[in-house]
Amino acid sequence: QVLFPLALIGGGMLFTAAIFADLHHPLQRFHYLTLPCSNLERFLSRYLLTGPLFFLFVLVGYSVSDNAAALLGTAWLEDRAAAFTFGATPVWQLSLLYFLMHATMLLGAVYFRSYALIKTGLVSTLIVFWCSLVQILALRLVFFEFFTSVIPDEAIALPAPLFARLPEITFAFGFLLHTWILYLAYATLCEHEVQE
């Protein structure tokens, strides 16, 4: 519950933040821009390297390490939690979160010339904060009779038909957001090459 998110999200964000470092380097960018490949090939190669391939590398590496630790059979491992499995719900949730955060970090790595990890983290935090505020205020305006203050009371049940399919709606929204962020990253990469 701690090491897998650190390896996947922490390591993935660090790796993704540095994947376009040669694009912004004053000397290495000429080599980057003169590679015999298109913008789409450049973008896809780095997306696949930092996204699906890194995810598989962490998943297989963590699974092998966890199962090897289970085979040691030492006394301090007897009370350990169940062995790591990809089918567990937290692993799926972390995986989906990783791909959304990866797309955001990829956009930041293309857009920001320096300190991509810090700047992308700050901008993402501000966006999430403002979106949450807008969501609370919108719910407060639409369902004002269910609220006793700006923040909803947990004891009050909002209309069930609206929230019955919330997991499916959230997944669809996340997929569309992920696709849109990847498109923005590719468009930013193309615009950056034109400017150079």
Image (cartoon, grey):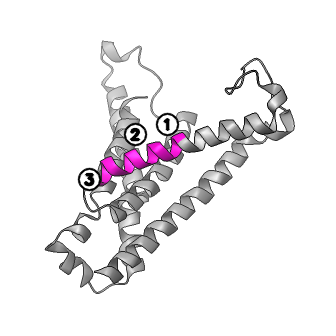
Q: Which residue is denoted by mark 1 in the rendering?
A: 85
Q: Nearer the viewer, mark 1 or mark 3?
A: 3
Query: Cα distance, mark 2 to mark 3?
Result: 32 Å
Q: Is residue 86 visible?
A: no
User: What amino acid is at disc 2?
Assistant: Ser
- Viewer-nearest residue: 53 or 134: 134
The residues colored magenta run 116-129
Q: Compared with residue 162, is residue 145 higher up or lower down, i.e. above or below?
A: above
Sequence-wise first label, 2 or 3: 2
- Look at 70% across and 42% down and name the residue there: 167
The answer to whether residue 107 is magenta is: no
Q: Which residue is denoted by mark 3 in the rendering?
A: 115
Q: Compared with residue 196, is residue 138 higher up or lower down, i.e. above or below?
A: above
Label 2 sits on a secondary structure element that is helix
Residue 184 is left or right of residue 149, and the answer is left
Q: Is residue 45 visible?
A: yes
Q: Main secondary structure of the magenta part?
A: helix
Q: Quadrant of residue 178?
A: bottom right
